[in-house]
Amino acid sequence: MHVVVNAAMSVDGKLSSRRREQIAISGPDDFDRVDQLRADSDAVMVGVGTILADDPSLTVDDADRRAARTDRGDPENPARVVADSRIRTPPDATVLDDRAQTYLLVSEAAPPDFIEEMEDAGAYVIAAGQDRVDLTTTLAKLEGDGIDQLMVEGGGELIFGLLAEALVDELFVYIGPKVIGGRDAPTLADGDGFIEDFPEPELAGVEQLDDGVLLHWEL
């Protein structure tokens, strides 16, 4: 599986404010780039924090791109993947509508009634890991389901977990002209943080886009 992480952050490295509310960081050209990346992917993945904060659809916006997907024999939208170690996904989340297949990744500690509720809401549930989602195992199961390119859109806890397991192949970071600040505001890679064996991505490209800059890294 090829895993592409895409994120937009402020000049000071924040994904949103300390209230974890959605903040517009990108401009129209970057939004269009992200939509194309979604259309080129087999699935789009987020952590449950993103679901709770933004309630995203994770679908392709542009009708021509959706049509191009169906023309090549793919579903109109990529599958959607939610990592939820703490069983917080609401049954009325937009990602559980019928616009695309949705996978919910949970730990083996997830209560059976929660799993049943999510399956009734339309999700395909994959359980792996004792207390937290085992990302290596669950991504391998997704690959076995035909997901060859996975786009990850955040948040910081999920991105850190993927980096810690050496599961990321490419990293796109759009840096927008905004300073958010706050010691409790989420960053690109939250989690426990590295104290050794730091990931060292190689810079593959730099592009000025809208009023900011897009950095492309390979791992």
Image: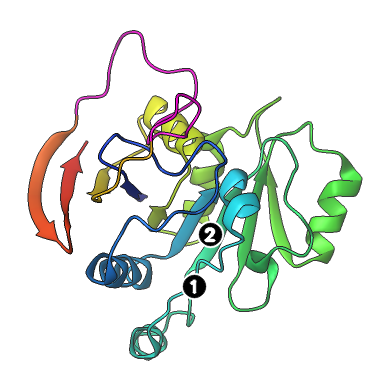
Residue on which the image places disc 2: 145
Residue 5 appears anywhere in the view? no
List x then y, in percent, for residue 113: 91, 47
Q: Magenta stretch containing residue 38, yes or no?
A: no
Q: Magenta stretch containing residue 192, yes or no?
A: yes
Between the residue at mark 1 and the residue at mark 2, the CA separation in whole angstroms equals 19 Å
Q: Quadrant of residue 211?
A: bottom left
List x then y, in percent, for residue 166: 35, 30
Image: 188 above or below 56: above
Image point 71% across, 52% down: which residue?
125
Left or right of 4 on screen, residue 96: right
Q: Quadrant of residue 167?
A: top left
List x then y, in percent, for residue 96: 69, 67
Image point 62% across, 57% down: which residue?
103
Quadrant of the rendering where the C terminus is positioned: top left
Colour mapping: rainbow
Q: Which residues are magenta?
A: 181-200
Image point 47% across, 30% down: which residue?
161
Residue on which the image places disc 1: 59
Left or right of 42 on screen, residue 40: left
Q: Element type at marker 1?
A: loop
